[in-house]
Image (cartoon, rainbow, N blue to C red):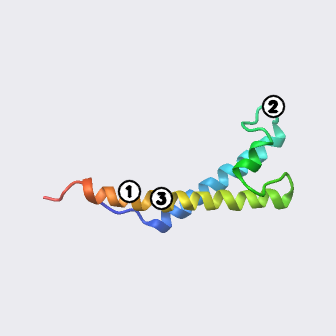
């Protein structure tokens, strides 16, 4: 089995987390009645977050870091198990 490339997955997950965060931040003020999270949940998920430009940027950076951390956990775990349980070439 082919091993996953850490750099590709880290960039992919970090970018995906940043995009989802940005969409949620844009969605919250436009449709407050339909928002998934109340304003109290944002600082709990993203320390330093506030509804200011600096606070939103801090949250964006943190969400990108969370995506990269997910790659740090996922890629080595996948590669480990793919070697142990992957198909053997005959």
Q: Is residue 12 left or right of residue 38?
A: left
Secondary structure beneath dot 2 equals loop
Number of the front mark, 1 or 3: 3
Q: Compare marks 3 and 2 and give the one earlier in the sequence.
A: 2
Residue underneath mark 1? 78
Number of the front mark, 3 or 2: 3
Q: Answer above or below: position of 77 versus 6.
A: above
Observer-nearest residue: 5 or 85? 85
Q: Quadrant of residue 37?
A: top right
Residue underneath mark 2? 33
Q: Residue at x 85, y 59 (%)?
A: 53
Residue at the extreme bottom of the image, as rendered: 7
Residue underneath mark 3? 73
Measured as percent of width and height from the top left, residue 67 is found at: 58, 57
Q: Is residue 3 left or right of residue 43?
A: left
Observer-nearest residue: 6 or 45? 45
Q: Residue at x 76, y 50 (%)?
A: 43
> Crowdedness of circle 1 by 10 Å Cα count: few (<14), some, many (20+)?
few
Q: Compare marks 1 and 2 and give the one earlier in the sequence.
A: 2
Secondary structure beneath dot 3 equals helix
On-image quarter of the C terminus: bottom left
């Amino acid at each position: 089995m082919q091993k996953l490339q850490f750099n590709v997955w880290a960039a992919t997950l970090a970018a995906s987390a940043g995009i989802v965060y940005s969409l949620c931040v844009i969605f919250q003020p436009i449709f407050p009645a339909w928002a998934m999270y109340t304003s109290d949940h944002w600082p709990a998920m993203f320390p330093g977050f506030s509804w200011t430009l600096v606070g939103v940027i801090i949250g964006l950076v943190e969400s990108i870091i969370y995506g990269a951390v997910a790659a740090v956990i996922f890629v080595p775990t996948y590669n480990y198990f793919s070697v142990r349980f992957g198909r053997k070439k005959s």
